[in-house]
Amino acid sequence: MRSLSLPVRLDDVGAALRDDGWALVPRDMLLSWLPADPADGDTLHTSWSDLPADTHLRDGGHYRFRRHSCFVLDTASQALSQTPHRAHWQPVTYNALHGGFERWFEPMHAHVTAHPMWQALLTRIGTLLAGLKPVPAWYIEAHQFRVDTTGGIGRPTPEGAHRDGVDFVAVIMLERHGIKGAETRVFEADGPQGVRFTLTEPWSLVLLDDARVIHESTPIQPLGDHGWRDTLVLTFRQGGFQGP
């Protein structure tokens, strides 16, 4: 795997993802690519303050809040449609802690999913990924996450280092507030190489080839009385959504 470096051109992103199984996209490149401006990002980010508690945490924690919605992107026409609300499901082979049962979360707000920046985000990323792996459609699951320091610690990935059982994963940083930790770790699924870095810049993006790498984020701790980390996770899968 290559050492950590930022791409200077959009073409570098596809090359890195193809060659190494992961790619890091800085904020300015992402916003220019969509295109969008910081005010659009701020408008979308306000909805992270209205995420219901995740009631499915099997470690007994109360540190995670989320919403979840699903979409289908026709890669030929670039038409994006939202599906009827559905459960999130993963097999235990990919998520030993939370796999094997349906997890229902509240859907994302309509003003978020209808926003032009949201539409561009899913469409542009999906089109880039289809250039690397041609498919007729991507089945996209979107997860809004807030992990906070209730109880003194928050776990962005309580299941540990994992794959998601999809083709590609996109992790987008929205905000770090009053925390330390949350180091992102990406390792070869079938080898010893890996990288470690911390996403700090709002609207920076890491793309992962889920067949080739495993990933995790370390726990967060508060710098003061209370802190949180907001992220958006998008998964792209060919052939359909995962289900029991």
Image (cartoon, rainbow, N blue to C red):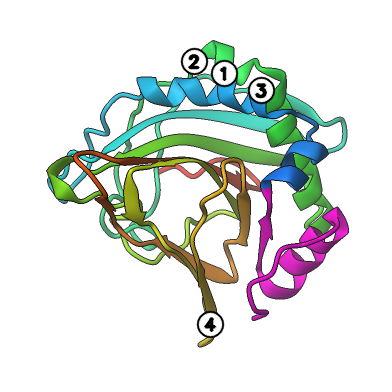
Quadrant of residue 177 within the rendered picture: top left
Residue located beneath label 4 in the image: 190
Residue at 29 percent of width and 57 percent of height: 219
Q: Label 3's element?
A: helix
Q: Earlier in the sequence, mark 3 or mark 1?
A: 3
Q: Which residue is mark 1?
A: 112
Which is nearer the eye, 58 or 124?
124
User: How far is disc 4 from disc 3 in space, using C-alphas?
Assistant: 39 Å
- Whichever of labels 4 and 1 marks the residue nearer the N terminus, that label is 1
In the rendered image, the residue lying farthest to the front is 224
Question: Which residues are the magenta region?
Answer: 1-26
Q: Amino acid at mark 2?
A: His
CA separation in Å, label 2 and label 1 = 5 Å
Q: Are marks 2 and 1 in contact (CB under 8 Å)?
A: yes
Q: How many marks?
A: 4
- The residue labelled by disc 2 is 109
Look at the image and say whether residue 16 sits in the magenta stretch.
yes
Say which amino acid is labelled 1: Val
Amino acid residing under circle 3: Asp
Task: Measure the alpha-carbon separation of dots 3 and 1.
Answer: 11 Å
Instruction: Check the image and report above or below for 182 versus 191.
Output: above
Q: Earlier in the sequence, mark 2 or mark 4?
A: 2
Residue 104, position in %: x, y? 33, 29
Q: Residue at x 35, y 27 (%)?
A: 105
- The numbered disc on residue 40 is 3
